[in-house]
Image (cartoon, rainbow, N blue to C red):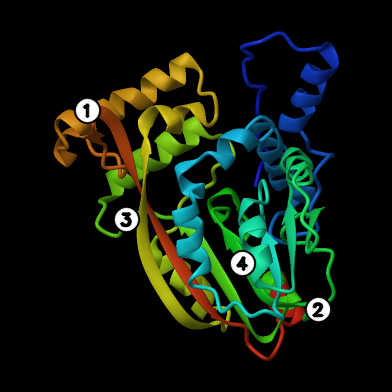
């Protein structure tokens, strides 16, 4: 796959030349963020560059992520209630972001280890230390842990940013104990959308967030488990409602992109007609005169197989 060059985001404030230089290489990081993943040819140039995009996109997001509608106490509790937590559980929160879920989880288990590729989010998470929570910077297909380390391994709201998903699932299996629990929660494409609406949904999200790869459907999430011999124990759907302005503010969308996204969202709000290209997959509606989006999420959880992935499976 050919490499894709990203350009730096426009700035709303003055920055030191070094900061601008660093951000440039966050976006164009062909050599800064290599992966050992076998999923990409040509020295993994595309995936390495994508890691840089993730770095740059999440550089200033930590406080907004903490305050996000996805991270309310109610939403985090909904997720944790679906995990088989025990007092002696050792848990991996993969792609932990600011560590907000790890902090909620800590009182209920023996220990929590959080990992994330973003140095900015890891630094932020470490400003809120808890005795039994350890945060480490790591790429999700190259975790710095021994085989069969964790009773529970989960990733929450991260897989739409990941391209090499098979490698990541294999790594989750590797570090999870045989018979341990593996879980994913992620934003999804609702099952009833037509193909053109899915394309508009992907366009909107990709325009808002350059680190977005693509959304899975509930069926695709389920197949990811089934095809990797993870015995599915639970599958559930839920929704999160988010004001449209908060959705845009999360990534500091520039004016031209804001106008392009708004065109679709406003059209969908006024006249949601698929034949007129006015559906988005975000189901915009008014709540107290505030334009609000609906995000659909799927939870899938299951038991890790007793046999670990073979080298051939990892390569494939």
In the image, is residue 50 above or below residue 27? below
Q: Which residue is mark 3?
A: 190
Q: Is residue 120 left or right of residue 212?
A: right
Q: Residue at coordinates 68% horizontally, 71% vertically from top-left?
A: 172
Answer with mark 2 or mark 1, whichever residue precedes in sequence: 2
Measured Cα–Cα span from mark 2 to mark 1: 51 Å
* Earlier residue among tags 4 and 1: 4
Nearer to us of marks 3 and 4 is 4
Seen from the viewer's position, the closer of residues 282 and 311 is 282
Distance, label 1 to label 3, CA atoms, is 19 Å
Q: Which residue is mark 1?
A: 267
Q: Residues within 10 Å of mark 1 (few under 14, many from 20)?
A: some
The quadrant holding residue 18 is top right
Labels 2 and 4: the sequence-earlier one: 2
Q: Relative to 178, does residue 128 appear above or below in the rendering?
A: above
Mark 1 or mark 3: whose residue is earlier in sequence:
3
Task: Say whether residue 85 is visible.
Answer: yes
The numbered dot on residue 154 is 4
| Vertical arrangement, residue 233 with respect to residue 41, above or below | below
How far apart are the alpha carbons under marks 3 and 4? 22 Å
How many residues crowd around disc 2 within 10 Å: few (fewer than 14), some, or many (20 or more)? some
Q: CA distance from mark 4 to mark 1?
A: 37 Å
* Residue for point 61% across, 56% down: 101
Q: Which residue is mark 2?
A: 147
Q: Is residue 191 left or right of residue 246?
A: left
Q: Quadrant of the C terminus?
A: bottom right
Mark 2 or mark 4, whichever is nearer to me = 4
């Amino acid at each position: 796959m050919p490499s894709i060059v990203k350009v730096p985001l426009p700035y709303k404030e003055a920055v030191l030349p070094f900061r601008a230089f660093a951000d440039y290489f966050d976006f164009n990081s062909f050599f800064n963020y290599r992966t050992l993943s076998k999923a990409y040819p040509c020295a993994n140039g595309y995936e390495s560059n994508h890691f840089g995009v993730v770095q740059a996109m999440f550089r200033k997001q930590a406080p907004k992520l903490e305050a996000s509608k996805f991270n309310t106490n109610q939403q985090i509790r909904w997720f944790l209630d679906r995990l088989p937590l025990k007092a002696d559980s050792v848990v991996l929160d993969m792609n932990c972001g600011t560590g907000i879920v790890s902090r909620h989880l800590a009182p209920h288990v023996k220990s929590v280890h959080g990992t994330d590729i973003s140095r900015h989010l890891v630094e932020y998470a470490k400003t809120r230390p808890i005795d039994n929570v350890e945060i480490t910077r790591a790429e999700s297909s190259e975790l710095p842990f021994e085989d069969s380390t964790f009773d529970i391994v989960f990733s929450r709201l991260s897989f739409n940013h990941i391209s090499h998903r098979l490698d990541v699932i294999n790594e989750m299996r590797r570090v999870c104990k045989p018979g341990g629990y593996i879980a994913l929660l992620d934003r999804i494409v609702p099952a009833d959308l037509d193909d053109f609406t899915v394309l508009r949904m992907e366009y909107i999200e990709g325009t808002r967030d350059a680190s977005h790869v693509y959304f899975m459907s509930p069926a695709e999430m389920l197949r990811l488990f089934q095809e990797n011999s993870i015995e599915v124990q639970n599958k559930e759907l839920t929704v999160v409602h988010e004001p449209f302005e908060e959705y845009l503010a999360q990534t500091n969308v520039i004016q031209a992109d804001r106008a392009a996204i708004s065109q679709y969202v406003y059209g969908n709000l006024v006249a949601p007609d698929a034949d007129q290209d006015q559906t988005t997959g975000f189901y915009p509606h008014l709540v107290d005169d505030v334009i609000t989006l609906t995000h659909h999420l799927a939870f899938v959880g299951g038991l890790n197989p007793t046999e670990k992935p073979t080298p051939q499976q990892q390569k494939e």
